[in-house]
Amino acid sequence: MARILALMALITGALTTVLSGVVMAAPGPAPVFGGVATCAGSTCHGRAQGNGAVVRQDELAHWQDPASPAGAHSRAYAALASPRGARIAAALGLGPATSAAACLGCHATNAPPAQRGPRFVLSDGVGCESCHGASSGWIASHYAVRGTHADNIAQGLIALDRPAVRAGVCLDCHGGAARPGHFVTHAMMAAGHPRLVFELDLFSALQTHWNEDADYAARKRRSDHLRLWAVGQAQAVRRSASLYAQAGLRTQGGFPQFTFFDCHSCHRQIDDDPARFKPLETNPARPITLGTPPYNDENMILLSAAARVIAPAAGGGFDTAARAFHGAVSAGRGQDAAAARLAAAAERLITAFDAAPAQRDTAFALVAAIADKTTTPRFTDYAGSVQAVMAIDTLLGALVADGRITVGAAAGIRANLARAYAAVKAPNTYDPAQFRAALGDATRAIAVLR
């Protein structure tokens, strides 16, 4: 599974407006991207061992890991030069993928040439500053003895400790953005680009390169796995609906931009064997006509379950907006307004999730909500089912981290979870009933430990 990350314009130097006289201060110089080498010294993040006094200081080694998901960002540019990357670029007529603007937005830190420092190297791939922001403003306060996290943010460091901000950054590539090089079209996928999948907490776990000790908690705050997961779902829905509301992205010639739709509702094995029959299941949350490609609602399904547990006052409004959106897409009328309402409903849930107090049994309640009679009938398609397995995996990890379930008990449950993963191993062998049975086994095994 691929994993990962703007909700807002993120503090990179702004114009100051004095409203009384409508006087504007001149903007400062554009921030400069120093490149990975700027962070790679042995006194900074380039140590061979993670034994730093404040941070690990071996972060570069994690980023460069050639085999694990933790090193995926450093390998992103090299993927463009691979045989697969070359085939995709050739099919799309882009020329070399390593210099194609449509690819570099997400496969490298593609800073404007005028903002590249002397140590910046494009082939480094997705470097530190893709996620943390151009370093010229904040790097001095970043290593100052008396510097603080707040100082760094004030100087342009992106506040990735805030779930909504982190999700927005990840989604720029793992969900799409309305900027050159940040939107994977259906044509790209037809040429061979993988389908995008996003789940914030899992992606964060794969990229973890810090120790959440007392010092970390004092400077920022400990990771809240449930909040990360829930906010990630909400941000994914908000981003998707916001992009779909843009007419220039919503269509591709005379066709819809199918990147927004569920791939596997159309892309499945097709033959004329009269003995073969694919049962048609009605999805209760999607009022669409038979044969209409469904909008990819994998994050909507999980967000609805999260809202019922964490923010029930806002959950009903979200479900209404989601259902109306599906109807508008199916009818081809009122799509802009429906998409805007759905994005706004997801935005309200982001705010509600961020303000919700931590509750002892929230993770157990979320597991139950994903497996209840309201949610499980919605698992009729492959993408939503994959998202559900990742959610249960995340929630199980949160229960272990909070001491609600022992490591040994979790290991026993993972055998059940493995069967749910097996049920979504490949889209052509996916069977909704089989998946729901496997998911039910896993969630019941968790529930008995409550």
Image (cartoon, rainbow, N blue to C red):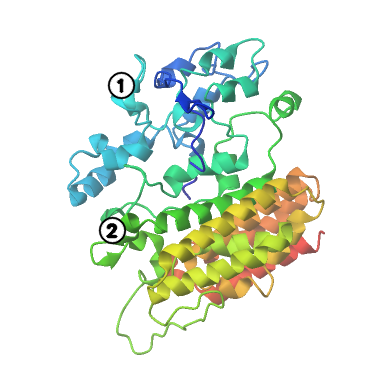
Q: Nearer the viewer, residue 271 or 247?
A: 247
Please tell me how many numbered marks the rendered image carries: 2
Residue 96 sits in quarter: top left
Asked if one can make out residue 86 in the rendered structure from this viewpoint, the answer is yes
- Where's residue 323, x and y in %? 54, 72
Q: Nearer the viewer, mark 2 or mark 1?
A: 1
Q: Nearer the viewer, residue 438 or 364?
A: 364
Three-letter amino acid code of the residue under disc 2: Ala
- In the picture, measured across the screen, residue 358 lies left or right of residue 143, that is right
- In the picture, measured across the screen, residue 208 lies left or right of residue 24, that is right
Q: Nearer the viewer, residue 288 or 444?
A: 288
In the displayed structure, 358 sits above or below 314; it is above
In the displayed structure, 206 sits above or below 270; it is above
Query: Helix or strand or loop: what does disc 2 sit on?
Result: helix
- Where's residue 162, x and y in %? 62, 37
Three-letter amino acid code of the residue under disc 1: Ala
In the displayed structure, 204 sits above or below 439; it is above
Q: Quadrant of the C terminus?
A: bottom right
In this figure, which residue is indicated by the disc labeled 1?
114
Q: Residue at x 60, y 46 (%)?
A: 201
In this figure, which residue is indicated by the disc labeled 2?
190
Mark 2 or mark 1, earlier in chain: 1
Residue 51 sits in quarter: top right
Q: Nearer the viewer, residue 291 or 32?
A: 32
- In the picture, measured across the screen, residue 60 lies left or right of residue 332, that is right
- Where's residue 320, x and y in %? 59, 70
Q: Residue at x 50, y 23 (%)?
A: 60
- Could you tell me how far apart the alpha carbons at marks 2 and 1 are, in whole angstroms? 34 Å
In the displayed structure, 373 sits above or below 220; it is below
**Of all residues shown, which one is farthest toward the bottom?**
274
Q: Residue at x 56, y 78 (%)?
A: 284
Query: Helix or strand or loop: what does disc 1 sit on?
Result: helix
